[in-house]
Image (cartoon, helix red, strand yellow):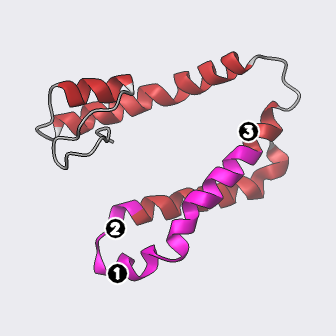
Amino acid sequence: MHNYLSIQYLRGIAALMVVILHLFTGSLFIEKWSNTWLRGGVDIFFVISGFIMVKSTINKRYSILYFYLKRIIRIVPLYWLAIIITIQSSTWTGWHSIASFLFLPAVHPENGAYLPIL
């Protein structure tokens, strides 16, 4: 994948766009930008990520189950850690917290919508 280093840089910039948008959503400074180019970061990131996943797995001889297992092992522990940190810094408890760990829909205690903690 070293041949695609510039694409990886663009993916990093797209990820930063998403982070900046989420950090400053609601601020007057970002409000004027949030409806324009910063929102494109999500689209750019997912298109590039899909391209990189296809290119990095095209000649691999393993099953789709193995691919998903690797993704789960890489992503879920960090997601659970972020949930734990969020729960520790808030008053969220009970079923909503458990459901977030199990990837199940549950009513969010603050807004009543079916959303996970994160």
Q: For the residue labelled by badge 3, is the local secondary structure a helix, a strand or a loop?
A: helix
In x, y percent, where is residue 13?
59, 62
Where residue 43 sits, quadrant-wise, is bottom right
Circle 3 residues within 10 Å: few <14, some 14–19, many ≥20 = few
Circle 2 residues within 10 Å: few <14, some 14–19, many ≥20 = few
In x, y percent, where is residue 49?
67, 47
| Rendered position, 4 above or below 105 | below
Residue in the picture at 51% in, 30% down: 75
Q: Earlier in the sequence, mark 1 or mark 3?
A: 1
Provide the residue designation for mark 3: 53
Where residue 24 sits, quadrant-wise, is bottom left
| Rendered position, 29 above or below 50 | below
Instruction: Tell me the kind of residue under disc 2.
Output: Phe
Provide the residue designation for mark 2: 24
Instruction: Tell me the kind of residue under disc 1.
Output: Phe
Q: For the residue labelled by badge 2, is the local secondary structure a helix, a strand or a loop?
A: helix
Q: Is residue 77 left or right of residue 11?
A: left
Q: Nearer the viewer, residue 6 or 48?
A: 48
For the residues labelled 2 and 3, the Cα–Cα distance comes to 30 Å
Q: Is the N terminus in the top left, top right, bottom left or bottom right quadrant?
A: top right
Q: Is residue 6 left or right of residue 58?
A: left
Instruction: Tell me the kind of residue under disc 3.
Output: Met
Q: Earlier in the sequence, mark 1 or mark 2?
A: 2
Q: For the residue labelled by badge 1, is the local secondary structure a helix, a strand or a loop?
A: helix
Q: Earlier in the sequence, mark 2 or mark 3?
A: 2
In x, y percent, where is residue 17?
51, 64
Q: Is residue 30 magenta?
A: yes
- The circle on residue 49 is none
